[in-house]
Amino acid sequence: MNLINQSKSEASIVSNLELYLCPDVRKIIKKIPDDFKLILEEIRLRVNKPLMVFGGQKDYFVDLNGNLTLTPNNSYYINRENIEKTLQFASDYSIYSVEDELKNGYITIQGGHRIGIVGKVLMDSKGIRTLKNFSGLNIRISREKLGVANTVLPHVITSNGEFLNTLIVSPPQCGKTTLLRDIIRMISQGVPHMNFRGIKVGVVDERSEIGACFQGIPQNDLGPRTDILDSCPKAEGMMMLIRAMSPQVIATDEIGREEDSISIEEAMMAGIKLITTVHGRSLENILNKKIVGKLVKDGVFERIVFLSNSNGVGTVDSIVDGFNLTYLYQNTKQNRLCI
């Protein structure tokens, strides 16, 4: 995709998303600078607080004319009606139809965009039942980045076409799910220039962030040989895939619980490869994590990819050989990789 077509595509993403905003907020977002719309990541609505947007690693207040400022002076202040109307649009005027998602604190809309929701939590004997008295929304814009895995694939696929168990590590908003998603897509469809044929991938998408399913259909391209369990706990989902879908690779996001570790061991015993992610900043950091640290020390992951935003979001800081924990690649001024 050339830059002109890419810019048009990025702009259309925001234009389509605007339809889910209440009229007052929609008018304002339409007025924000077009160049900022290309990097817009979040729109935040909080009752009795100024409208805010986030992009390019910075957040801004927004006034009635769509101007972005660093102080809240003259900003448009959100009221409860703005939030309620936005949720009406997002739920197609039936908030009850998305109650199952509300229990998780978000809903996913067409295009794969996610609306995070806060308010009063209602509990029952089984746990969180739903939310009401909504007080804040965080609209996270979903953008696929096709091809970002190209720089990493030679490190996670061997010369004889074997995919290696891979762990992607990064702080929040540094591209780990974006990279995970594109690796899934590429190993599912195949990588001709690496003589890698497509393989079957099973995805357990507990938070609906990988496939961004809307009414059960992934809004992101995960490849033709991929099966996805949406909104499913990782441990249970991995076992379901192993029993029923014969995956060659299982992909999940953000492991860290004891039950995740047990399911990973079951998958490996079945000869299934794994790709997953975890929050972290360094090898030392993840080695100190109870569950993930043990998996790393046991040599479960053959490759560990560390991301940061040191040279922009998606900077590949290092790639580690999981067998002996030595560095295969380290980011320097002369040698830089970005996804």
Image (spheres, rainbow, N blue to C red):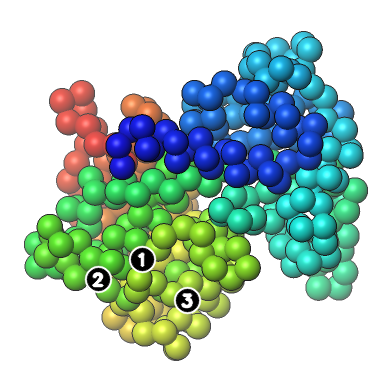
Label 3, label 2: how far apart the Cα atoms are: 20 Å
Q: Which residue is mark 3?
A: 238
Question: What mark, if any, has residue 198 been given in the picture?
Answer: 2
| 322 vs 148: above or below | below
Q: Which residue is mark 1?
A: 223
Residue 41: percent from left, percent from top: 55, 36
Residue at 60% x, 63% y: name it.
214
Q: Count neighbours of disc 2 (C-alpha within 10 A) and say few if under 14, some if 14 to 19, many if 20 or more.
A: some
Q: Count neighbours of disc 1 (C-alpha within 10 A) and say few if under 14, some if 14 to 19, many if 20 or more.
A: many
Q: Nearer the viewer, mark 3 or mark 1?
A: 1
Q: Marks 1 and 2: in contact by CB < 8 Å?
A: yes
Q: Which SS class for mark 1?
A: loop
Disc 3 residue type (three-letter): Met
Residue at 40% x, 56% y: name it.
181
Q: Marks 1 and 3: in contact by CB < 8 Å?
A: no
Q: Nearer the viewer, residue 309 or 92?
A: 92
Label 3, label 1: how far apart the Cα atoms are: 19 Å
Q: Is residue 89 visible?
A: yes
